[in-house]
Image (cartoon, rainbow, N blue to C red):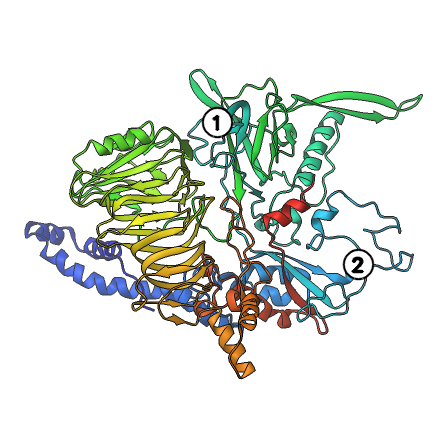
Amino acid sequence: MNAIVTSARVEAERDRLFDLLPAHIRAADAAEGYPLLALLQILAGGFAEVDAEIDTLYDGMFAETAPEAMLADLAALIAAEPLQPLPEGTGQSMRAYIANTLRYRRGKGTARVLEALASDAGGFGAAAVEYYARLARLAHMADIRPERPALAAPVAGGTAAATATAFDRLARLVDVRSIARAGGRHHVPNVGVHLLRPVAPEFAGPTGPGPFSEADLAGVPPARPWRIGGQVRAGYYQLAPVEGEVLRLFNPDRRSQDAEGRVVESDLADRLRRLPLHLETEELRESTLEGRPARLDESPWFDGLAQPFTIYIGRTVSGAMRYTRVPPERILIANLDTPPADPTIRTAATRAHRWYTNGTAGPVQHDATSPIDCGFDPVTGRLIVADGVAVEAVRIAYAAGIGRETGAGPHDRNTADVPFELIDSPQGSILVWLVGASNDPPPAGVQIAATLADALAAWNSQDRSGKRGFIVLRSCGREGGAGLTAKLVAGSELHILAARWISPQVRPDVAVDTARLGYLVRQGRQFAIDAPLKVEAQAAGGGRLVLDGLILTAGLTLEDSAVADLVVRHCTLRAPGGIALGSTGPLAGGRVEIADSIVGPVRLDGGEGGQMIVRDSIVAADGAAGVVVDADGIDADWRNMTLLGPAAVKSIEATNCLFMGPVTAQRTQAGCVRYSWIVEDSVLPRRFRCQPDLALAAAAERKGDTLNDAEKATVRLGVQPTLLDTALSEPTLAMLHPMTGDAIARGGEGESEMGAFSRAAAALRMGNVRSLFDDYLPFGNEAGLIDDTRSSAVSMRRNRP
């Protein structure tokens, strides 16, 4: 089992043994310099190792605590169907599937179990549909159907948006095709498991009416002014960090709220639509005025446990910013695809309602108005404050979709290779500046900076040689300006990161460890830098710069030999229409690493050499013309990458990549491209199991002769990857279309998909779920997985009004 024995555990065991000795022996040992204690230290190591093994063995008896390596033994014990292993870093475990196997068997043959399997074995939000209930048939007393009491059925306004999804209630004629093999749906034995691939990390905000301080809302992103015609309009805001763009809000994943019931629409992490939210907020307003309980359907969007979004309006009170939460009934859901014709128009401050009650002589008419604080569009993330409502700032807690936790966002970014505990040893080697409001007072040795610019100025003025600096942006925020500059010297290291800061606890009975400065929790925070960021070097050879959890909307520029090592992790690095990451001089052997990020065009001068490493990231043109990656003097090492455009490098090593434009390597005698899609006109080194090479070879073998140009074009078209979206502002950016074949969806290393979402392994997870259907379906029934993930273009056509 190889249990891990920490030094703290050994010391605890040593101290326990030492305390068992009589007091006079302990005193004598202290007088001699603790030789006996040193002996017990050696003995304690063995005792601690045995205890750790016993603890691990005990933990392995339960699915909740068993190490990952022991889960297979538990699965074999209960005869759980083995699942295909997933790539490292997928984030999906067999734990829930194994723990719930017996419960699945008790509910075998029910749609609820199929939904649970899709969730536990695949990690998908899913809803199961028994299609026999959706077949059209006559309504008569021998076949009473409560949901269709008569032949005439009024159609709800959301019917078109739900067409072909799990929540499509329209009656259909029979389709006798197999659902698993031929795509048929509406037939008596067919069951469809509709799933959604995007994940929706959530910025969580406080509940209650408030008021809330800036520190209370540290984890809630601010909205920026929504400029119209280049001008700021009073009361107009947008959530998107890039000016003029949209941000599609998602419903947070709420499946855990009702573990025993069936999945309803408001449980799933999917795009928010205007109409359901409008109908619900209207009902909340009307029921309040009429003095009756709200008549909400089976899937309310605004409830006591969670909400799809929460709006906070800020005003200065007694010299400090205070925020109040806008209740759902005071929000007017609006269509803000385009701004109002008159940009001075604000949302009306009231909404009229008329209703009638019974009276002695006839119906009695009632008229009243409900107060409105703002109009909000969840499809674009735009907001207009109501006329007459005083506002100075707006913050919105929300969830947004993405194929995998890539780019800046509230998701967990903690890993073993990034600093968590900051220990200043030797003293003065670590410099820390905290930016943003917080209720956690910092310890001595940690400085407070009002802005990121102030923190950078303080770092730039320091003697930085051999020092590590941390600028911790501890609240979600945004900072603009003409430009920001970070200066590095050889041997220096600067981290600029968005993270929660936790100061060490101070207790009266425990000595303060002045070397321990605090802890960095990289979760629930992002920070937008709305100004160009420049990196300068003040001595020969630059230092190391780490950017983490940031949104840069105006690009990053590296001056001549500015960095020896640049790390961009979990960032959204953009400069729409321009260069997102560029250098004004040679890197001089510098190293650039991009991991789990979304990046615009890159222009790097290798000079005497340099290296560009990309992992699990998307690099796109972002509105700029020309080559997306212009680094012909750089050695490229790319893995799990989607490149939306052409690139030029010196040499290349690539695995699991989607090259949606031609890639040119100057040196083809070195390097290798593996498990990747390559477009025509690319100049690359040797290839291994790439597409369309494999498809062309298979087609030539079937023909028994060389393919002509037309046949080659046909084969390429048959395996070409299709992406749902290519705009960097869209949630389904670079996600494979559901119709993409296995040549791409399972053509990566280890049968994962090619591209930036390779580690998500969606096709493998779907295969695991399909493999379980036969064991949990009644005899004669057939189930199929249906991917309801849609592009923004398709979703917008379904989202009218």
In the image, which disc is placed on residue 212?
1
Residue 183 at x, y = what percent? 68, 66
Left or right placement of residue 115 versus residue 561 in this view? right
Between label 2 and label 1, give the one nearer the viewer. Answer: 2
Q: Which of the two residues, 765 or 705, is positioned nearer the viewer here?
A: 705
Residue 468 against residue 191 in the figure, above or below: above
Q: Residue at x 33, y 57 (%)?
A: 649
Asked which quadrant contains residue 548, the reply is top left
Residue flagged by tag 1: what amino acid is it? Phe
Residue 745 against residue 515 in the figure, above or below: below
| Image quadrant containing the N terminus | bottom left
Asked which quadrant contains residue 756, the reply is bottom left
Left or right placement of residue 558 versus residue 184 in this view? left
Q: Residue at x 52, y 55 (%)?
A: 735
Considering only order in the chain, which callout, 1 or 2, is on the residue closer to the N terminus? Answer: 2
Q: Secondary structure at mark 2?
A: loop
Residue 287 at x, y = what percent? 73, 30
Residue 478 at x, y = what percent? 41, 32
- Calculate the distance from the C-alpha at mark 2 to the C-alpha at mark 1: 51 Å
Q: Which residue was labeled with disc 2?
A: 172
